[in-house]
């Protein structure tokens, strides 16, 4: 297993899965998955399409529930030490960025970017009309937009944004609650090369602050140098879990992705290693 930050009684693990299994339809998608991610331990969950990444996210966010295990008193899923969460409270502690949220917001044609971010304070896709938006709430929205490099977009309509702009706003929306951690689900999907580069730089900046990143992806180039641990999934199971330099090699990736994968490194001007991969 990968080295984890030292356990701290005041900071319970961010995510704990204990023999968690999920069946969707007639298919067992996750097979008694064990996983522990400490706060402060930036982690990538990597694997091909169909390996169980999306199911894992929905398990953490309570959109899916694990199979009951008779006779085992240990909860199969705990987030920040708790087995039961109200969804709005969970999202105030764990910022979540998924394409599902973006699709819902894009359908609201009069929604401004600022209101889209403010709605994150209420675990809703709109600002409740009966609630007063305080000056502190607006400042939190502006701070989150600035942190996500999206402040110039604040007066735009969300439905009119480019994919890259919308992704930055979704990250701001997740950050508006000042969460302890950020769960990013395939964040570069649909982005062009320049927008992807901006996203990765933003992720690096967030990782250097006291925000734990959990990145779920099938692109190894998204695993920025600040993410030190990689959990490689295959067929709903953990194939290997360890430091990224040990996990990101051709043999492991070829096994997980079901075909030959070539891996190499490039170093940036600061000497940080960036991993790239190609089929063949």
Image: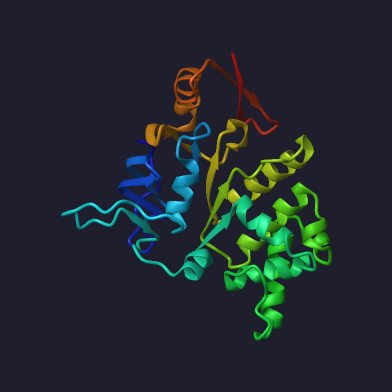
Question: Up-down: is 92 above or below 4?
Answer: below
**Residue extending furthest left?**
71
Does residue 41 appear anywhere in the picture? no
Q: Position of residue 214 (x, y in %)?
A: 51, 47
Point 68% across, 63% down: residue: 144
Front-most of residues 251 and 41? 251
Q: Position of residue 11 (x, y in %)?
A: 39, 61
Point 64% across, 67% down: residue: 125
Question: Up-down: is 147 above or below 29?
Answer: below
Front-most of residues 29 and 229? 29
Does residue 56 appear anywhere in the picture? yes
Point 81% across, 63% down: residue: 157
Q: Position of residue 153 (x, y in %)?
A: 81, 60
Front-most of residues 154 and 112? 112
In the rendered image, the quadrant that contains the N terminus is top left
Residue 267, quarter of picture: top right
Judged left or right of residue 150, residue 41 is left
Q: Position of residue 109 (x, y in %)?
A: 79, 64
Front-most of residues 76 and 272? 76
């Amino acid at each position: 297993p990968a080295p984890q930050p030292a356990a701290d009684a005041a900071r319970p693990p961010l995510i704990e899965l204990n023999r968690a299994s999920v069946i969707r339809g007639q298919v067992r998608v996750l097979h008694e998955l064990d996983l522990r991610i400490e706060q402060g331990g930036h982690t990538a969950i990597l694997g091909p399409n169909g390996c169980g990444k999306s199911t894992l996210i929905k398990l953490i966010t309570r959109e899916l529930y694990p199979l009951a295990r008779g006779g085992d008193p240990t909860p199969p899923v705990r987030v920040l030490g708790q087995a039961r969460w109200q969804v709005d409270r969970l999202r105030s502690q764990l910022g979540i960025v998924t394409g599902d949220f973006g699709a819902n917001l894009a359908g609201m044609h009069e929604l401004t970017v600022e209101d889209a971010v403010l709605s994150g304070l209420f675990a809703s896709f709109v600002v409740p009309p009966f609630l007063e938006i305080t000056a502190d709430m607006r400042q939190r929205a502006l701070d989150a937009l600035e942190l996500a490099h999206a402040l110039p977009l604040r007066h735009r309509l969300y439905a009119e944004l480019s994919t890259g702009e919308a992704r930055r706003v979704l990250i701001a929306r997740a950050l508006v609650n000042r969460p302890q951690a950020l769960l990013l689900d395939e964040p570069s999907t649909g982005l062009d090369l320049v927008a992807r580069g901006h996203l990765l730089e933003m992720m690096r900046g967030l990782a250097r602050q006291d925000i734990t990143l959990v990145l779920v992806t099938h692109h190894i180039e998204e695993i920025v140098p600040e993410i030190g641990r990689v959990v490689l999934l295959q067929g709903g199971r953990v194939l290997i879990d360890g430091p990224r330099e040990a996990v990101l090699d051709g043999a492991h990736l070829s096994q997980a992705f079901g075909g030959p994968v070539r891996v190499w490194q490039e170093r940036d001007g600061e000497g940080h290693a960036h991993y790239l991969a190609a089929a063949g």
